[in-house]
Amino acid sequence: MIHFGVAILSLLLATPPQTAAVGKPAPDFTAMDETGASYELAKLRGKAVVLEWTNPDCPFVERHYSADTMEKLATTLGAKDVVWLAVNSTHSNTPADTKAWKAAQGFAYPTLQDADGTIGHLYGARTTPHLFVIDADGVLRYAGAIDDDPDGDSATPTNYVGKAVAALLASSTPDPSETKPYGCSVKYK
């Protein structure tokens, strides 16, 4: 009976795994990029961080990379000391695949390798692309789509991520703080 009571008490006291929620501290993680460099979210405190879920085989990702949507925004924000990290949670992805894709696309920011899906599940990443914006204090402030143009037919799409980061840099709250992401499903195991 005592062992049963200890087991129940242990279950009650166990902390559930932290998951991402807008307005709450962003779940910490450590991951390697395609070159083997390590990134720990907690060590990026003091800077805004954009996490971009990606998969080069997704037509939505291909469209945005052909238009340089991510690269232009990452470059603009990088000049403002914002960190942009792509995350690939595709179960079959390898660092060599990522290196080849980056060389073909010509972008410089790191792509974190998450083939086991740990970070993707922690953040609830559902699509590629799916973006998350974290403020300098480590609080998740935006989650959702890159823009309001899932079909790619708008001449002037509203870039939600750009607006969210601009709000943070102006010491304001992003509006909207959540949107419905669009794209391909994340290819978890």
Image: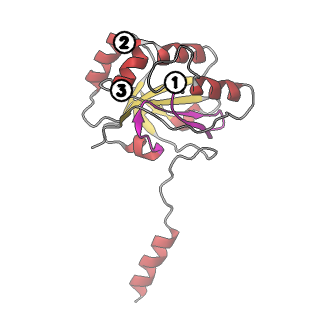
Q: Earlier in the sequence, mark 1 or mark 2?
A: 1
How many neighbours does mark 1 have within 10 angstroms: few (below 14), some (14-19), or many (20 or more)?
many
Separation (CA) of disc 1 from disc 3: 17 Å
Q: Marks 1 and 3: CB-CB under 8 Å?
A: no
Mark 1 or 3 closer to N-term?
3
Task: Quote the CA–CA distance across marks 1 and 2.
Answer: 16 Å
SS at circle 1? strand
Residue identifier under label 1: 84
Q: Position of residue 62 (x, y in %)?
A: 36, 19
x, y percentage for residue 87?
41, 31
Vertical position of residue 57 compared to residue 5: above or below: above
Amino acid type for the residue under numbered disc 3: Gly
Q: Quickly name the residue at label 3.
A: 36
Q: Dot 2 corresponds to which residue?
A: 105
Please tell me whether residue 133 belongs to the stretch shown in magenta. Answer: yes
Q: Which residues are magenta?
A: 123-147
Q: Is residue 27 above or below residue 171?
A: below
